[in-house]
Image (tube, helix red, strand yellow):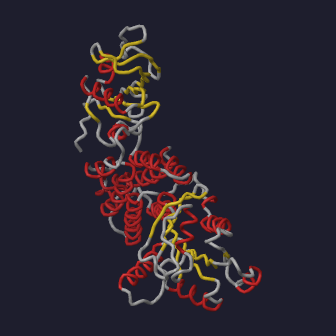
Amino acid sequence: MNFNREDTIAALATAPGVAAIAMLRLSGKNAFDIINKIFVSKNNKKKDFHKVKSHTLHFGSLRDGDKEVDEVLISVFKNPHSYNGEDTIEISCHGSPYITQQVLNLCVKSGARLAYAGEFTFRAFINGKLDLSQAEAVADVIAADSESSHRVALQQLRGGFSNDIKKLRDELIHFASLIELELDFSEEDVVFANREQLKKLVSGLQITVSSLSDSFELGNVIKNGIPVVIAGKPNVGKSTLLNVLLNEERAIVSEIAGTTRDTIEEVININGVIFRFTDTAGIRETVDKIESLGVQRTYEKLGQSAVIIYMIDVDETSKLELEEILKDLKDNLSDAKTIILPVVNKIDNSDLKSMEKEFQSFDKITFISAKNKLNIDRLIKLLLEKVNLSKINFDSSIVVNARHKEALDNTNIALQKVLLGINAGITGDFLASDIREALYHLGLITGEISTDDLLENIFSRFCIGK
């Protein structure tokens, strides 16, 4: 990576644009020297920030020579008691884009350089303030767009997941050291690591690692949203339902069957849960090449969904036909856990009681009028009940990062090699090699093992100023 840790870096830490207040960060070994050059207190005196106490505030102005740039409030954080373990100055100024640019230019003119994306957090990682999984959680906290994703990211930022991984590594390291000790006394044929205890340990670790790996499916849903596909025959009201859920005219609605030729995707936050709704082309046999491509994409989206809202027209689909459709749908889904919610639309002029009696054999079927927004609240309530994120234990570790998922799976493969090796009675050197492989993959998660390419890939995704 081209991060020079000897440089003092500066960046705007708040969002660009017009605001009442903006905040800029200045961090590095010369941060106090730079602020000493440009800050003047209200009594028009210079101040030596090397001598002030950490975690104090100082009101005054920034000056470029004789020119006053802005009135500011300076926050002081002395190493190692700062976000990234370095001497850090935070400058709160007025939120005009012109002023923030002038302040940033003044910092650079006085000896700082502009920070790269993620460089402040990179230094926190290098200085031991955060491990790698916690650093990744910083970006997740910033990007969180729901209560669920925010809580999961905070749990990881606070070190819950890191502590789980550290515990796993410590237990493995203990036995690895005993086996390495055996190798030092190989001529004496001494056994320090009890193989049965090691087998028991590895079996327990596999359960824990598998549990963490399996949580990725839930974590991915929490982080990226629950994929919901609205499907059905042409002209049953799929696009109308999407528009109602969005509360805007997002999809074209027409009486002409086959209007929707491609998928339309929108993200909606409902009671703190993110849903990714996809309106699809109506499912039917057609000779129209473009429409048939749309139908093909519909089937692709069905295979990627966690929930399918299958809509029918009350006047066009019977109970028996719906049974056949849903059976065929279930038989062709790759994931048996996919939730299918049958929805009967266009009930405006129908006898609701007789319809409920006719379709009573269907689990949680919903009767709506998308056009007149009738019973939409019932559908939303049912959707929330089915996904049921409210019962998640956010105090437990939930894996949300694909990189962590891959590392956990590779750890499990290495642990399986250890078990097979113990059962086969292989020598300590081969056993130690397999344990080291497991430790390597666990170390990739928290950063005990890292490469420049890995670090650059992770921190380049951060925003400037963080």
> Does residue 324 appear to the left or right of 290 in the view shown?
right
Q: Which one is in front, 429 or 321?
A: 321
Q: Residue furthest right?
A: 353
Residue 108 position (above or below residue 206):
above
Q: Nearer the viewer, residue 106 or 284?
A: 284
Residue in the image at 61% along x and 82% along y: 313
- Percent position (x, y) of residue 86? 36, 29
Residue at horizontal 38 percent and vertical 62 percent from the top? 406
Considering only vertical position in the picture, is 215 above or below 371?
above
389 relative position to 456: left or right: right
Can you give x and y, in whole percent of width and height, for residue 66 in the image?
A: 29, 13
Residue 12: % across, % down: 36, 34
* Extreme residue toward the front, this view: 255
Residue 237: x percent and y percent?
A: 56, 76
Query: Which of 208/462 is in front?
Result: 462
Residue 193: tell me if it is visible.
Answer: yes
Horizontal side of 343 relative to 454 (left or right) equals right
Name the residue located 31 percent from the left edge and 53 percent from the top edge.
185
Residue 26 occupies quadrant: top left
Q: Which quarter of the image is occupied by the N terminus?
A: top left
Is residue 211 visible in the rendered structure shown here? no
